[in-house]
Amino acid sequence: MSLLRNLFIGLTVLVLGALPAAAQKSTSKSTYKVAFHVDENNPAKMNLTLNNVKNIIADFSKSRQKVEIEVVTYGPGLHMFRDDTSPVKARIHEISLAHSNVTFAACANTQKNMAKAENKEIKLISEARLVPSGVVRLVELQRKGYAYIKP
């Protein structure tokens, strides 16, 4: 009986000792997720955000890690995705063409409020997709395990 018990304990220790290595190995190949938050009409912050996006892509590709990135705008930050006022639309277009793992989400609430305030339709660049609420989208992404970054 004691031999059987010792064998069981030995196997348990062996299995438990291997678990951290197995868990570490599986997470090293998992996809990293990053959410960027832009809520200011500030070209320097918009460019900083896009610089960060490109840096993350470059660093993760060096180590062969997968990464998904979503840039979420609302409030004055929606200008980043406005077709008529975006100071970075050419950079967004370039990033979108080169990296299918980067998405751009624009707040529909903000778009609607801007249209009302300016008494005109607010068109977005083709790369941006509307989400009902930018704030809610950030909450959803964080709940899904996205790292949150506000440059």
Image (cartoon, rainbow, N blue to C red):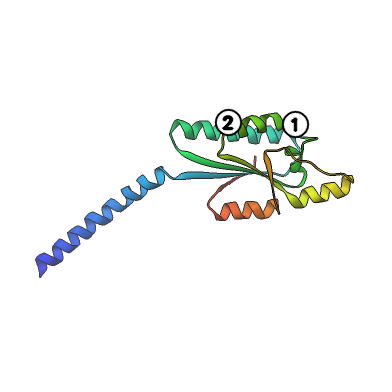
Structural distance between the alpha carbons of marks 1 and 2: 19 Å
Q: Are marks 1 and 2 in contact (CB under 8 Å)?
A: no
Horizontally, residue 36 falls left or right of residue 87, namely left
Badge 2 crowding class, 10 Å Cα cut-off, few under 14, some 14 to 19, many 20 or more, is: few
Residue 30 in the image: state x and y as whole percent. 44, 45
Q: Residue at x 64, y 36 (%)?
A: 49
Q: Residue furthest bottom?
A: 1
User: Residue, x 80% and y 35% (percent of image)?
Assistant: 84
Q: Looking at this view, is 138 or 20 the one in front?
A: 138
- Element type where label 1 sits in the image: loop
Please give the residue where the numbered disc 1 appears in the rendered image: 87
Of callouts 1 and 2, which one flags the residue occurring earlier in the amino acid sequence?
A: 1
**The residue under label 1 is which amino acid type?**
Pro
Q: Is residue 92 above or below residue 4?
A: above
Specify whether 113 is left or right of 30.
right
Amino acid found under the numbered disc labelled 2: Ala
Q: Which residue is labeled 2 in the image?
A: 98
Point out the image quarter for the N terminus: bottom left
